[in-house]
Amino acid sequence: MNALIYTAGVIIFVLGVVISIALHEVGHMYPAKKFGVKVTQYFVGFGKTVWSVKRGETEYGIKAIPLGGYIKMVGMLPPAKGQDPHEVRGTNTGLFTQLISDAREAEYEHVGPEDEERLFYRKPWWQKLIVMSGGPMVNVVLAIALFAIVFMGFGALKPTTTIQAVSDCAIADAEAGRTCTDEDPITPAKQAGLAAGDTIVSFDGTEVTGWDNLSALIRANGDKMTSIGFTRDGVMQTKDIKTSVLARASLNNPDKLVNVGFLGVSPTTEMQRQGPGFVAAQMWDYTKGTADVIVHLPQRMVAVTQAAFGGEREADGPISVVGASRVAGEMVTIDNPTWAERAIRLMGLLAAVNLFVALFNFIPLLPLDGGHIAGALWEAIRRGWAKLRGKPDPGYVDVAKMLPVAYAVGAVLMIMSVILIYADIVNPVRLT
């Protein structure tokens, strides 16, 4: 049974990724067509064409390797300055010059006079910005929608004021797994006789509204005497307790230790539906975390490369779609989750993938969307500055000059993908 569920988890995740890719490309194609750009191809996947159909001037299809997608917009590269794009350049010197020239020639091979006003490079900078931002912004919207379904529809695990466990001794190492000894001080909660299942309702005469509120009251109490109101088996009780002082992580700076009041109880958790504010806060946290992952991706790839050839694989290191699919399979089987928990885990994983795809595509380098976005913004700045100074219009930004960078970045991305896929096959990240 677990094998079937594992397989279903992998298939559902892969379908989710393919749909996300398809919608990403729609995010580019829809505004492009609205702005009059000629779009000749819309494909999901790379490699050999599995299926395609032509509707109007656009060929829609699916390719064999579902690791990406693309749309073909006519006129992405402007012609060389002072050159007819339909004429082959007579002489080219240098490898990069030849590459750029060949790319321009291929770009205009099937462009007729009727297409001149439909070329992408001729569009205003703000239309280029919308077209190129459309793809990653779709992924952002998908991430928000999936997280909203998870947190607002199902809920998030939140601590309650019901006690799950009472610590035996008041030592900072207890949470790290150190066993209490007879010489260690007993926690205030244990001294007072609090027990698992008790629900704390008041602290020092103040009504408790939630675990965060209770935790703040305990921390602020220091080592003073106080009273705690709680219910046990439906009966209201009150205990006088003197909290102790212990070094704990600061709420404002988790890396800093501060001396605060300590009671010695841990809360139970339950799924609680959240509002839009919680979703927004989580999106912000996930965005910062994902951006940090992308910034440190090159150094993390060193560890992945070592793991691919016998080293230890980091549990929180980067993975490919192959690795993410394996994780999806484990997510729906590990710990014997309910069907609701399986849905939550898969949607959370898909949301994280969409957020990563969006932020990664915003990197301002060709061939990523961010490279074209940067070109559009630079065109706006250059033309605006020339206008302010009363200078002639400098014209369109020639992104073709950045093709050598695009080829280099593309090669690096391909190598990274191969290493990640290989590592995910021979030494995969496992949840167990």
Image (spheres, rainbow, N blue to C red):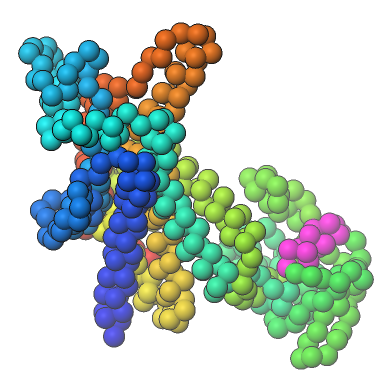
Specify the quadrant of the image occupied by residue 65: bottom left
Residue 431 position, x and y percent, is 38, 65
Q: Is residue 206 left or right of residue 313?
A: right
Is any part of residue 348 visible from this angle? yes
Q: Residue at x 82, y 71 (%)?
A: 208
Q: Is residue 324 left or right of residue 206?
A: left
Q: Is residue 67 left or right of residue 281?
A: left
Q: Is residue 219 magenta?
A: yes
Q: Is residue 82 magenta?
A: no
Q: Nearer the viewer, residue 420 or 304?
A: 420
Specify the quadrant of the image occupied by residue 414: top left
Query: Where 173 falls versus 234 (above or below)?
Result: above
Q: Nearer the viewer, residue 316 or 400?
A: 400
Residue 413 position, x and y percent, is 26, 40
Please give the range of residues in magenta. Answer: 211-223
Query: Where 350 falls versus 11 (above or below)?
Result: above
Dominant secondary structure, magenta:
helix
Q: Nearer the viewer, residue 264 or 33?
A: 33
Q: Quadrant of the N terminus?
A: bottom left
Query: Where 374 falls versus 144 (above or below)?
Result: above
Q: Residue at x 30, y 56 (%)?
A: 22
Q: Nearer the viewer, residue 385 or 205?
A: 385
Q: Quadrant of the C terminus?
A: bottom left
Q: Is residue 228 left or right of residue 322?
A: right
Count of number-bearing discs: 0
Is any part of residue 182 visible from this angle? no
